[in-house]
Amino acid sequence: MATKNMLFSGFGGQGILFAGKFIAYKGLIEDKQVSWLPSYGPEMRGGTASCSVIVSDTPVGSPIVSNPDILVAMNLPSLDRFEDAVVPGGMIIADSTLIERKVKRDDVTVFYVPATQMASDNKLGNLANMIIVGKLLKETGDYTEDGLNAALDKVISARHADMKEVNLKAIQLGAAL
C-alpha cells in the first residue's frame, strides 16, 4: 500500500469531513498510520470544506496534503482549485451531478460519479459523499466488508445508529460503479 495522500473537498454540508474521517478510521482499524486534518470556511453549510487524509504503512510526518494522490471533488470550485495539485498518475473522483466540466489533465485517472443524483434516486438523502467513498475504496483496492462495518461503527454515533445501513448501502452503490 505504501502511502495514500487524499484530499476531500466540497461545500459545507456535503459530508466532506465525515467522508475523510471514515477513511481515516478505516485505516486505523486496519493497523495503518493515519492523519485526518479538517479545514472549513467560516460558514459550515454552504461554505467551503476540505480535509486532508493520509493512510500509510509508515508513520505520517505531516498531516498536510499539498499534492494529493487522490482528489475527491464534490463541487466545481473544489475541482478548479485542486485539480492541478494532484500528482501525475494520481486519481480524481468528481461528482458529475454538480461538476459539468471535464478534468483538463490527461496524466491522471478520472472517475465521474453522479453521486448527488444517485443519492437522490435511491432516497439516500445527503449521502453522495459515501457513494464516492465506495467508488474510491473499490478503485484503490481497499474495499473490505469487515473494514466498512467497523469504520461505520466508529464514525456513526449511537444516537444515529439507524444511519449505518443507509451509509453502507451508499458505499455499496459507489463500489458497484
Image (spheres, rainbow, N blue to C red):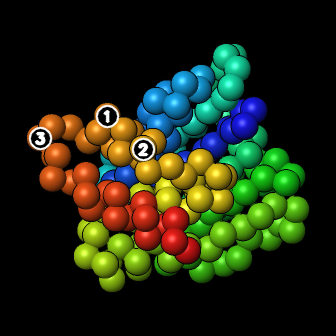
Q: Nearer the viewer, residue 52 or 59?
A: 59
In this rendering, the count of numbered labels is 3
Say whether disc 3 or disc 2 marks the residue closer to the N-terminus.
Answer: 2
- Where's residue 59, x and y in %? 67, 16
Question: Residue 130, can we see it?
Answer: yes
Tag 3's secondary structure? Answer: helix
Horizontal side, residue 160 vs residue 96: left or right: left
Tell whether 123 sits left or right of 132: left
Tag of residue 146: 2
**Mark 2: amino acid:** Asp
Q: Position of residue 155 (x, y in %)?
A: 32, 38
Question: In the image, is residue 1 above or below residue 60?
Answer: below
Residue pointed to by mark 3: 159
Circle on res. 45:
none
Q: Residue at x 38, y 39 (%)?
A: 151
Can you give x and y, in whole percent of width and height, for residue 98 in the image? 50, 74
